[in-house]
Amino acid sequence: MTLSEKDLQQIAAKGITVEKLEQQLGEFKTGFPFLKLEGPAAIGKGIVAPKPDEVKEYVGVWNEYKAEGRKIVKFVPASGAASRMFKDIFAFADAEYDVPTTDFEKKYFDNIERFAFYDALNAILFKKEGKGVKELIAEGEYKKVAKAMLDKEGLNYGQLPKGMLLFHNYEEGARTPMEEHLVEGALYAASNGEANVHFTVSHEHLDFFKNKVAEKYETYAKKYDINFNISFSEQKPSTDTIAANPDGTPFRNNDGSLLFRPGGHGALIENLNEIDADIIFVKNIDNVVPDRLKEETVEWKQVIAGVLVTLQKKAFAYLELLDSGKYSHDDLLEIIRFVQEDLCCRKADIKDLEDADLVIYLRNKLNRPMRVAGVVKNVGEPGGGPFLAYNDDGTYSLQILESSQIDKKNETYMKYFTEGTHFNPVDLVCAVKDYKGQPFNLPNFVDRKTGFISSKSKNGKELLALELPGLWNGAMSNWNTVFVEVPLGTFNPVKTVNDLLREQHQ
């Protein structure tokens, strides 16, 4: 591949090396291997289902841990634009017909007063048209109402980040998901009277997001008698990936420059790596509920955090024992049981290892980042499934897999995927420091072979796009993972605007 001087300047400006570029172009040609599976995780096979007394115990463990003055951060991926939420309303605005025709459109307009953004939309329309929503609908001017919600001259909801939309109604005024995450931070992720909340935001929305946070956070600081430390980061340009033509050569824009695309949420492992914390909660921006339903969410966040710090404490004690050299053969058997049963990481030929090799193996498995992921019973919502998958070293361990990582031609694997009892709604709590208090370098624990390639188009031309290993999939592949069953009520994502009409968001 020949790169021009202009190409070299472009990739250097992004912080990407020529080697990295060539590696990515090679991946378009070779593709990515499918994962080898042992089976789906299930209750008693990688998924823990705490009983009521255990729930209480884990909440207590978490509150004790917080009282020790640890640094806890709530990490919220919030760079997604809301445009996909309004796909159907965009389609209506451009349609040849003028009145709601599809079920989705009818539902939206029939229930428009129930949306938390209704008052703001009404005010905009009075300003623009001299008439409110009801009057315009009575006159059949549905498209004016739709466009006032979507367009820049209106609420601009078609372009804003999802975290900035009005989701929930309260007596004192409607709230955005950003505000709901601040409240959650105060309720389960605060210690020493401080809550640390980190938002990853796209560059174009950063200033807007910061201004909105500055406008709102004092209200919640006062309400919960807490100090907020709120920080932001953007996806790094160096994590963008080259786009390719269908033949695997670099795709070029009309001006001849190389086309780079964001590498997907897996790029955020770099952002996560820069967070200074003992424990980090990770939760998507749109998975929030009003205050009346928060109790269950808060309780179960504390449960999964309690499970994490319980396991971490054990792992740390075993690492200290191994590093001291003062262990017996029985101690090694106990550590094997912990790795196999509690951390669900198994190696078929472990009995063949000499003690010295066994210690190296156990130390490697214990001395890595750890996460506990909440999983909910599968009720047909899309999401990553909890599986037991094989690693390069012949072990198998718990992973969150997407359907794209599974060989569709393998009937057994597809059966595993369709029969999986649970899925993960991005409900993670992560321990990112070693037993000596040093932060792990998280990019070292990414399985680079778990990216994937998708077909896209630009300016009417087909292209291949390269996605990095997903944040909670391949980017955390070499972590210790444990799954905990959490109630379905803790998972309330908003994928389309009409999801806001669900009882949980009203």
Image (cartoon, grey):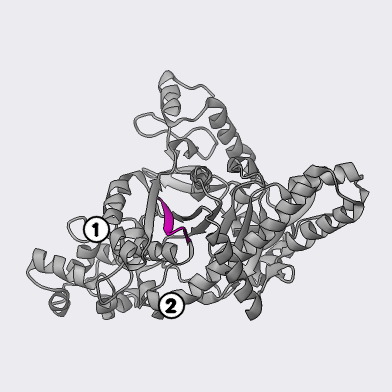
* Count of numbered circles in the view: 2
Does label 2 or label 1 sit earlier along the sequence?
1
User: Horizontal placement of 498 versus 328: left or right?
Assistant: left
Can you identify the residue that label 2 sits on? 293
Spot occupied by residue 101 in the image (x, y as percentages of width and height): 30, 76
Whether residue 203 appears in this view of the structure is: yes
User: Horizontal placement of 172 versus 45: left or right?
Assistant: left
Q: Residues within 10 Å of mark 2 (few under 14, many from 20)?
A: some
Tell me which corner region of the image, top left, top right, bottom left or bottom right, holds residue 112: bottom left
Can you identify the residue that label 1 sits on? 156
Q: Are marks 2 and 1 in contact (CB under 8 Å)?
A: no
Q: Nearer the viewer, residue 91 or 420?
A: 420
Q: Which residues are magenta?
A: 190-199
In the structure shown, which secondary structural element does the residue marked by tag 2 occupy?
Answer: helix
The quadrant of the image that shows the N terminus is top right
Residue drawn 42% across the image and 55% down it: 197
Q: Nearer the viewer, residue 123 or 282?
A: 282
Q: CA distance from mark 2 to mark 1?
A: 29 Å
Query: Compared with residue 320, is residue 310 higher up or lower down, i.e. above or below?
Result: below
Q: Residues within 10 Å of mark 1 (few under 14, many from 20)?
A: some
User: Horizontal placement of 160 versus 386: left or right?
Assistant: left
Spot occupied by residue 312 in the image (x, y as percentages of width and height): 67, 56
Residue drawn 43% across the image and 31% down it: 14
